[in-house]
Image: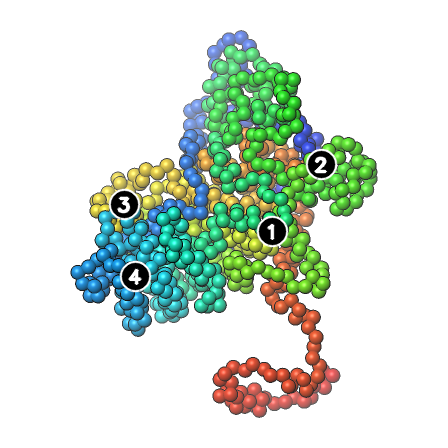
């Protein structure tokens, strides 16, 4: 696993390119001064066309190595590796999940389609024997409940085949009794209706018992281990059970305005039942995590992993809450802690962003530069216009050079470079700066064009004051941020500005409380821990959490499109491959689409559930989040995600690995047309694949979570050469995905060197316009006080020690066990009543014989201990 995940950076491990004092002169003012105009990126020598002369003349020829015929192979090679630059804007709306019908359709593989008719046949045979001459839709509520109770009684039989037939009949009910319907909407309605009915009658609990039996079925495990190739037939019972449970969870989870009051009550009851251990000693999600680890260990290769992961994701989404619920919970938690409200709703800000154009490549620019030569020959060289201070950001791009003709990448008509969502000025017209014509209020207001309010940490204020005191006074005052005696007036104003934008997070409060509890365990007493679904899940996962994370990443690696098939990799196709392999070209194409779709759904579910875990654990307690993060990092999650993106990402997002006529519920109510190779190749008409774009955004968000404020992990991004990989991902014109790519580029910009920054000014400009600003953050210049490589290992070790102390204090032992008084009286100790098991007196004599009388007493050993 370690070697697989580290492949993206194998063989090349450059050190950090941290710039020295030469870049220190280019520092952005903390309180907002004039932003320096960066030096334009020089055009590569072989691609730089000759400069036009003042007098009219024919268009100059480029150097020999830049001739179009010699560039043609390079251009075709680049397009193959990076995809088309002319990507349209993707109308994608990020959410907790896709549409309800799509989420149900992704539960089934196309090779499972014949089983739909099998389920229907099992139901109709039993139903006609019980209720002759009538249909399910014609029964009233009481009769439907009576028939479901009859089916549940059938689950108690000993015969395995009979039990499976009854389970298939229940699955047909959960699938919406499609045999009696002719409309997809009606199938989805009756699927929801029957799911609520099944839950009310205790079906989920009955299926949970059957699932435990199948997990512990050693005969099925040993049979699967002996087979050279595992197919759908090896997991029939498990797939039926998991399908019923998934349909119940997904149908009950989704809220609709037309829901009946009793349905809303059922939803809350079901959420509590899944969140907290009611019938067992562990939450339901832990059972699914156990199935994942058992599958990855090789003990149960027949487990249908796609269905397990989809059910696990939806259970976490149902019990913990989605992203909007998480935002509301965060707002409420800040109110409870007495913190100021959030400066903005991040979900709404991201939704309102517009996508930017992808950055231009140097090979593309050569064509564009030649096209501009004639236009530039007709223009006179424009004088450099001095850029004014921050209050003109709404009128011009601060990272754009005003000198025409210097940098070909920044020329007037090039539209393939990254542009922010705000096109702040017309490119052909340079308007002279006339400060007297602007209202004076604009000079003191923050630029309105930036989407995020800037944030400042307490640590940033302390660092700023420490540097100022060392410079002007010669000594520091530690963490004192109030005393400003001896500092000049501009420093006072800077500190005032920093404090205005100071942001205290919930994590800061939690870390501070944890330090106080470690320092004064007796005086502060026992901590009151609120019992939430997130807390219950973490406590249940705690001791096996490293194994859970490793197992998820193993499956993610096997499902990644960039992974190569290896003999030692796990087989994730057990629940998609048919018993008889295809013999025609059409069957092979259909199976190939099914396998790719299967892998995409696995990536989608793993990326979504990992992101949910990270976000909820971070809100519940920062050290729970850090514990999960560290084990993901130790399991090579960072290089694994980079390896995932080291592909033609546009091809992945626009992949058409679906056959819409075979999707549920369409295939149940419509006559299937004859499939041809042409129809399979054409795919659907969608502009992009929702699940693949969703997966990419989730993986980028996970990578941001792992690396934010962690310099050692940021250096991993640099060492694994993530910058070109991430820059290629900017070709996807979707605002949310671009935002998280730019965040990852921003945190490592200071380590990439001056030359990289000079030649990627479009990207730098996009970072400035889209990503939140941190005052005193020298992300663009490399003068960071925390960028000390020798502190990286110590940083991780300190964090790990804090995590272990937190877990030990809260979960290992009762708070006062270490300080409890010891009873030294022999009579008192012997007189205590001990709770013995009920069957102890039956085996008491045997225990005495084995443990006391048959054991020789070595009296001489007592002398050695005195």
Q: Where does label 3 land, which residue?
A: 661
* Quarter of the picture holding the C terminus: bottom right
Instruction: Please give the name of the residue rendered at 63% of the width and 42% of the height, measured from the top-left corner.
Output: 16
Asked whether, in this view, residue 579 is left or right of residue 841, the answer is: left
Q: Say which label, 2 or 3, has the lower sequence index.
A: 2
Which residue is situated farthest in the front direction here?
Answer: 261
Q: Earlier in the sequence, mark 4 or mark 3?
A: 4
Q: Nearer the viewer, residue 727 or 526?
A: 526
Who is closer to the viewer here, 715 or 706?
706
Nearer-N-terminus badge (4/1): 4
Disc on the earlier residue, 1 or 2: 1
Sooner in the amino-acid sequence: mark 1 or mark 3: 1
Q: Position of residue 739 (x, y in %)?
A: 52, 38
Residue at 36%, 62% (x, y): give it: 200
Query: Mark 2 — residue?
Result: 496
Can you identify the residue that label 4 sits on? Answer: 170
Q: Taking 329 as reference, is 33 left or right?
A: right
Residue 206 visible in the shown view? yes
Image-quadrant location for residue 772: top right
Residue at x 43% of width, y 42% of height = 693
Q: Position of residue 430 (x, y in %)?
A: 56, 17
């Amino acid at each position: 696993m370690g070697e697989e995940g580290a492949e993206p950076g194998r063989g090349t491990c450059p050190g950090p390119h941290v710039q020295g004092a030469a870049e220190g002169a280019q520092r952005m003012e903390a309180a907002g001064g004039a932003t320096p105009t960066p030096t334009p990126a020089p055009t590569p020598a072989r691609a730089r066309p000759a400069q036009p002369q003042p007098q009219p003349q024919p268009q100059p020829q480029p150097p020999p190595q830049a001739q179009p015929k010699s560039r043609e192979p390079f251009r075709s090679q680049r397009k193959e590796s990076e995809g088309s630059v002319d990507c349209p804007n993707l109308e994608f709306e990020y959410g907790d999940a896709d549409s309800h019908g799509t989420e149900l359709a992704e539960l089934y593989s196309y090779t499972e389609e014949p089983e739909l008719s099998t389920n229907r046949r099992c139901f109709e045979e039993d139903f006609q024997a019980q209720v002759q001459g009538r249909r399910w839709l014609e029964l009233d509520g009481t009769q439907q409940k009576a028939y479901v109770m009859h089916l549940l009684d059938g689950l108690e039989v000993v015969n395995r085949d009979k039990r499976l037939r009854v389970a298939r009949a229940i699955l047909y009910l959960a699938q919406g009794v499609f045999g009696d319907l002719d409309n997809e909407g009606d199938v989805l309605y009756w699927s929801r209706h029957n799911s609520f009915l099944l839950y009310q009658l205790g079906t989920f609990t009955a299926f949970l018992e059957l699932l435990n039996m199948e997990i512990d079925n050693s005969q099925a495990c040993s049979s699967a281990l002996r087979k050279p190739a595992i197919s759908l037939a090896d997991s029939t019972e498990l797939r039926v059970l998991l399908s019923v449970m998934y349909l119940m969870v997904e149908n009950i989870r989704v809220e609709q305005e037309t829901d009946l009051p009793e349905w809303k009550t059922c939803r809350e009851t079901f959420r509590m039942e899944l969140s907290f251990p009611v019938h067992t000693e562990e939450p339901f999600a832990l059972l699914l995590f156990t199935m994942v680890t058992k599958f990855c260990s090789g003990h149960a290769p027949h487990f249908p992993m796609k269905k397990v992961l989809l059910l696990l994701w939806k259970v976490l989404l149902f019990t913990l809450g989605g992203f909007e619920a998480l935002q509301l919970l965060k707002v409420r938690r800040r109110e409870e802690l007495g913190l100021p409200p959030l400066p903005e709703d991040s979900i709404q800000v991201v939704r309102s962003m517009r996508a930017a154009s992808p950055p231009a490549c140097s090979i593309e620019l050569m064509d564009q530069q030649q096209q501009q030569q004639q236009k530039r020959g007709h223009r006179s060289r424009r004088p450099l216009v001095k850029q004014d201070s921050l209050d003109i950001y709404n009128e011009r791009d601060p990272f754009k050079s005003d000198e025409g003709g210097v940098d070909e990448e920044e020329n007037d008509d090039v539209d393939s470079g990254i542009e922010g969502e705000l096109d702040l000025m017309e490119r052909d017209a340079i308007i002279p700066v006339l400060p007297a014509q602007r209202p004076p209020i604009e000079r003191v207001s923050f630029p309105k064009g930036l989407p995020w309010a800037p944030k400042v940490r307490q640590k940033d204020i302390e660092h700023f004051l420490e540097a100022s005191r060392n410079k002007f006074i010669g000594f520091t005052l530690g963490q004192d941020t109030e005393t400003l005696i001896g500092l000049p007036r501009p420093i006072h104003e800077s500190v005032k500005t920093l404090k205005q934008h100071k942001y205290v997070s919930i994590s800061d409060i939690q870390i501070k409380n944890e330090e106080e509890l470690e320092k004064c365990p007796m005086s502060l007493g026992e901590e009151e821990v609120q019992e939430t679904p997130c807390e219950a899940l973490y406590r249940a996962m705690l001791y096996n959490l490293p194994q859970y994370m490793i197992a998820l990443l193993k499956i993610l690696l096997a499902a990644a499109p960039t992974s190569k098939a290896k003999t030692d990799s796990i087989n994730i196709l057990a629940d998609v491959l048919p018993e008889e392999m295809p013999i025609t070209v059409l069957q092979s194409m259909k199976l190939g689409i099914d396998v790719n779709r299967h892998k995409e759904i696995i990536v989608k579910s793993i990326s979504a559930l990992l992101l949910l875990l990270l976000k909820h654990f971070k809100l519940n307690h920062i050290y729970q989040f850090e514990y999960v993060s560290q084990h993901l990092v130790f399991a090579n999650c960072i290089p694994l995600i980079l390896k995932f993106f080291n592909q033609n990402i546009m091809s992945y997002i626009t992949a058409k690995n679906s056959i819409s006529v075979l999707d549920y519920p369409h295939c149940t109510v419509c006559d299937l047309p004859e499939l041809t190779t042409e129809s399979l190749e054409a795919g659907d008409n969608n502009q992009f694949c929702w699940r693949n774009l969703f997966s990419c955004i989730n993986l980028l968000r996970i990578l941001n979570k792992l690396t934010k404020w962690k310099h050692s992990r940021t250096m991993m991004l640099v060492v694994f050469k993530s910058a070109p990989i991430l820059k290629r991902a900017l070709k996807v014109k979707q605002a949310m995905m671009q935002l998280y790519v730019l965040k990852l580029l921003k945190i490592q910009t200071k380590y990439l060197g001056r030359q990289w920054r000079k030649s990627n000014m479009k990207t730098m400009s996009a970072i400035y316009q889209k990503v939140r600003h941190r005052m005193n953050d020298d992300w663009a210049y490399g003068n960071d006080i925390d960028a000390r490589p020798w502190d990286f290992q110590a940083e991780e070790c300190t964090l790990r020690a804090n995590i272990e102390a937190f877990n030990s204090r809260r979960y290992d032992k009762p708070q006062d066990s270490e300080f409890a008084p010891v009873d030294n009286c022999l009579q008192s100790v012997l007189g205590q009543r001990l709770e013995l098991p009920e069957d102890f007196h039956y085996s008491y004599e045997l225990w005495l014989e084995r443990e006391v009388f048959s054991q020789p007493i070595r009296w001489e050993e007592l002398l050695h201990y005195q």
